[in-house]
Image (cartoon, rainbow, N blue to C red):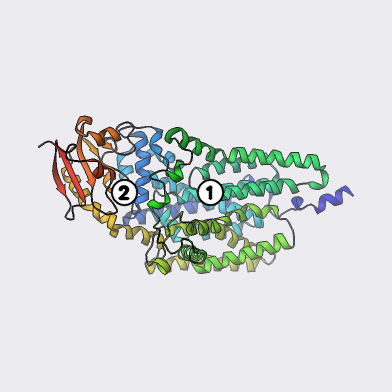
Amino acid sequence: MESTILRREPSQVKYPQPAAAAKRDYTAWGVGLAAAVISAVAYVITVRLHGVLLYVDSISHLEIARRVVSSTSPGLAQLGYVWLPLPHLLMLPLVWITPLYLNGFAGAIVSMGAYVATAVLIYKIAFRLTGRKFAGVVAAAVFGLNVNMLYMQSTPMTEALLFCALAAMVYCVQQWADTDKYTYLVGGAVAAVGGTLTRYESWPVLACLVVAVVFIAWQRRSGRMTAKIRWSSTQDRFLTFTVVGLAGIAAWLVWNWAIFGNPLNFQIGSYAKPSNWVSSGEPFIGNWVIAAKTYWYAMTDNETMPVLLLGAAGLVCLLVREWVIKRTVARTLPVLSLLVILPFFIASLYSGQRPLHVLQISNDLYNVRFGLIMLVPAAILIGYLVGTLQRVRPAMYVAGALVLVLVAGLGASLIRHDNVVTYTAARETLTSSTVVAQDPVVAYLKTHYTGGLVLMESFGNENIAFQLPSDELVYEGSYRQWLPSLKNPAANHIDWIVARCGNNPYPDKVCLAEGKAQLSNYTLVYTTADHDYRVYRLGK
């Protein structure tokens, strides 16, 4: 009787994958090598297109990392409170090298490494789900050949690192669900720490994974356990995963409280408020339909409609095979946890927490890259869809080949029609009023700045700040220097003052603070044609 019970347990189902695969999988190495080559080629192309630093945020990420090691007040406090710290910490090994800082490679290499690791992890996830390496290769290719992903991995942005952390979280919890090895559970929690210290989108995914861990632990070997032992086992695994996994979020709250006086400063601080980026007149605020349409268009722009449809077909197939037929539910929960991103973004748009513009609704592009995150679950689900044909191997190989041809063709078409939306959105920033207004100041300082401390607010003036030596800039993050320098710049050895006094987008704190008394020792040496920007130099 006991053996019969054991055979019927979902957690004991055997899947057709070789035992040695987990120890030595040469296909995984091949996927990694191919991804590394593709990554390098994509980066070279991006460099030739002058696209590495098109995003203003990419410059800001580099500036934050650089200031940790080289600024008027270097130290970890320069990490600030708006963006999560892990991407900037990973840039530290190279960001102090000025050429690699200025060309963006110090940050892009982090994204490139994360891209390669994500491709391998997606392969492993799909392989584990289906028991077929070919399905894993297809999943990795769907992810790795997406041209929007290839552009983002060539920049110092944080998306690629987030995707890597999410894939690692899912893979480790999936492995634990199949093997009950504690090391995988802890590994998933450690990956969660990395993810939650990279981007906030990982926080709801972690919440779903906590629920998944509880469910998986509760149903595991239930026939051989008393209720008390079953509860104790579930509690043990829940506490292990939760305590370790939430450590990153807890550390961030403590950081905000200890450095800035409020554990929620990352949400309500003066430079973190959603109102800094989201206009009250956005059409998606308070409208669920427009919020859902906006994010749907962002997904189709990034993944393309055929890929999303194939991913949806894979999702239906997974639910039918693993849930309705009940082979096992537990092994699907980690992957399904990624789908929480969809309602998370829709709710964020509805509540005015995130700005996102698509051409179909707002007639411009802004943060459209937010839709790229759904590429990770879509790639896994497409790999699963191909793997379901494994009983008729020729059909599986034909279907997989067709998917690869489709993905490659879609990418080529997007490139040919200049419709790589992440690149297009970044390129449009060159013509934005904010960047255009800063260009003349950048040109002036390049030819006239000869050294000395510069007083300038960095927020909203990132392009100008990027051209100045980080250890000569007194800005809002300069510890015990910023406020005194605003009150009396000459007494604090300020040689240059850069002030934004126009309404593009609004006067900065330097302009508002510097009156005739503060500027009495300075000469106005440059002003833009519209008088929005003014540059002062010490001396008459």
Q: Residue furthest left?
A: 540
Kindly identify which numbered label has been placed on residue 505: none
90 horizontally vs 242: left or right: left
Closer to the camera, 537 or 519?
Answer: 519
Task: Indicate the amino acid at tag 2.
Answer: Gly
Q: Which residue is mark 2?
A: 460
Residue 202, label in figure: 1
* Image coords of residue 262 (percent x, y): 46, 37
The residue carrying pointer 1 sits among few (fewer than 14), some (14 to 19) or many (20 or more) residues within 10 Å by Cα, namely many
The answer to whether residue 178 is seen in the rendering is no
Earlier-in-chain disc, 1 versus 2 = 1
x 53%, y 47%: residue: 165
Q: Is residue 384 visible?
A: yes
User: Quadrant of the image for the C terminus?
Assistant: top left
Given residues 390 and 459, the one toward you in this image is 459
Q: Secondary structure at mark 1?
A: helix
